[in-house]
Amino acid sequence: MSNISSASFSDSKPHYELLDGLRGVAALLVLWYHVNEGYGFAESVNGVSDGLIKVFYHGYLAVDFFFILSGFVIGYAYDDCWKKGFTKKNFFKRRLIRLHPMVVLGAVLGLITFCLQGNIQWDGTHVATSSVMLAVLCGMFLIPATPGGSYEVRGNGEMYPLNGPFWSLFFEYIGNILYGIFIHKLSTKILAGLTFILGVILIWFTTLDISHYGSLGVGWTLDTVNFFGGALRMLFPYSMGMLLSRIFHPIKVNGAFWICSLVLLLLFCVPFISAMEPFCMNGLFESFCIIIVFPALVWLGASGTTTDKKSTGICKFLGDISYPLYMVHYPFMYLFYSWLIKNEYYTFGQSWEMSVIVMIWNILLAYACLKLYDEPVRKYLAKRFINKKR
C-alpha cells in the first residue's frame, strides 16, 4: 500500500482527498481485523477450537483495496510524466524514497518486539541470535524467507517473520518495477485487455479454490500457490487502478466518503461462505468485491470532494497515517497475540480493554513515526537525490 504525500516531493500532483481518507479507513479496518485475528490464533495455538476469526471475516481484502488505490494514484501521478522526459531511474528513486524508510523502521520494530518475546518461536523453540539478525537484515531489504529457512524465525512460514504484512510491500515493489519497465508504455486499450485477462484468472483462482484455503488469504508465505496468488492479488487491482486513472470522469455524488467507508465495513464483516459446490462461493464473493465493488468505490471516492477545512483535514490525517500504521502495527500484534495465548483469552469481551489500548497505541505510534521519522527522512532523501541543484 502506498500514497503520494505532500511531504514527498514538491512537484507531486494534487491528490484526491477522499481517496486519502479511504486509504486511512482501510488501514484502520486492517488494524481491527488483526486484533480480531488474535483470538482465533490464540485458540489455534492452545488447541481450543479451529482458530477461525469470529468477526470481521474478510478484513484481509483491504490489501486488495490498497492495491487498486495504489494503481490509481501511480497512474494518475506518473502516466503524463513519461511524455516529458521522465526516466525509469527517476521513477524508481521516487518510489524507493516513498516506501522504503518505513520498511527499515518496520523491520527494526519487528526485531524489538521479537526480542521482547524472548527470541522464541510460537512453539517455544529458542531462535539463535544470528538467525534473528539475518531476519532483520533481510527484512530491511525486503528479501523474503522461505518456510523452514534459518531466518524464518517465528516458525509459521511467513515471508517476513518480524513483520508479516511486508509481504504486500514485496508484491507492490514488483508492481512498481513492472509499471516502470513496461506497463506505463501500454495503450489504454491494451491495458484494458490485460486487466480483463487478469480478472478472468482471478475468478478462476478464487472460485475453483486453487489455494485450497477457501479464501483469497494468500501471498504471505513463499510457496508456489502463495507466490502465484499474491502476485495475482497485486496484478489485477494494480492494473485496474491504473486503467481507472486513465478513463476516470467524475460523477456527481454526495457523501462519497461515508458511503464508501460503510460499504468497506459491511463487506469486511460478511461471514465466510462455506458452500463449495459447484464453486467456492466465498471465492466468488471475493472476486465480486475486487473486480466490481472496489473499482466502483475508487470511482466514487475520486468523484467526491471534501466540503470544508475540517473534513479535508480529517481525510489528510487518515491518508498520512495509513502507510505508517500498516507498516508498524503488526510487530505489536505479535506481542498482543502472545498475551492472549498466555492468558487464554479467546473473545473480545474477555480482553476488550487491552484490544482498545492496542488500537490506540498503534494509531499514536503511526502518527509519531510519520512526523518524527518518515516525513523528515523522505524530505532529506528527496532533497539529496531528486531535487538536487544543478
Image (cartoon, grey):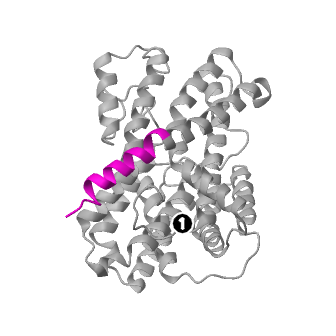
Q: Could you tell me what secondary structure mostly forms the magenta stretch?
A: helix
Residue 383 is one of the magenta-drawn residues: yes
- Residue 248 location, x and y as percent? 55, 81
* Frontmost residue, 183 versus 27: 27
At x 30%, y 67%, the residue is 180
* Frontmost residue, 262 versus 79: 79
Q: Is residue 376 visible?
A: yes
Number of disc labels: 1
Q: Which residue is mark 1?
A: 203
Residue 18 is one of the magenta-drawn residues: no
Q: Residues within 10 Å of mark 1 (few under 14, many from 20)?
A: some
Q: Is residue 224 visible?
A: no
Q: Is residue 225 above or below residue 281?
A: above
Q: Is residue 321 left or right of residue 305?
A: left
- Residue 292 location, x and y as percent? 62, 71
At x 73%, y 77%, the residue is 253
Going by the numbered disc 1, the residue's amino acid type is Ile
Q: Is residue 89 left or right of residue 24?
A: left
